[in-house]
Amino acid sequence: MEIKNRKSQEIVAFFEALDEMLNCIQSTLDNRTPVLNEEKYLTNNDVTNLLHISQRTLQDWRDSGRIAYIQVSGKVLYKESDVGRLLEDNYYPSSL
């Protein structure tokens, strides 16, 4: 029976796979959306990326009351359901 050490190909491949899984888990944790009372909250960046709009457009929508938001100590958050409602309220089906 061959003794494996840290330079053996199987051990190196094992640790590379572990590193890849760790990076994947860390990326998932970094990009997760926090949930509170079964509601997901989105940041300005989340909403602008989701809707393909600028930060300024989003601010205009807040100022005009077009989209609901929460502001705590300068941090602005949006309920995911409110963003979905905004899309549904502005949906115009095809007449074909």
Image: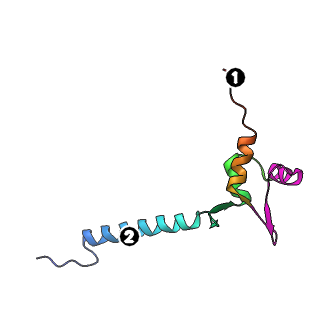
Tell me: residue 95, above or below residue 90. Answer: above
Mark 1 lies on residue: 95
Q: Where's the C terminus, which quadrant?
A: top right
Mark 2 lies on residue: 18
In the drawing, does residue 13 fall left or right of residue 31?
left
The amino acid type of the residue labelled 2 equals Leu
Task: Please report whichever mark, 1 or 2, sits nearer to the chain's N-terminal start.
Answer: 2
Q: Where's the N terminus, which quadrant?
A: bottom left
Residue 11 in percent (x, y) is at 28, 72
In the drawing, does residue 96 fall left or right of residue 7?
right
Disc 2 is placed on an element classified as helix
Disc 1 is placed on an element classified as loop
Q: As rendered, which of 46 and 65 lies closer to the eye?
A: 65
C-alpha distance separating marks 1 and 2? 53 Å
Q: Residue at x 31, y 69 (%)?
A: 14
Q: Residue at x 28, y 77 (%)?
A: 6
Residue 22 in percent (x, y) is at 45, 69
Q: Residue at x 64, y 67 (%)?
A: 37
Q: What's drawn in magenta, residue-wise?
A: 56-77
68 in magenta: yes
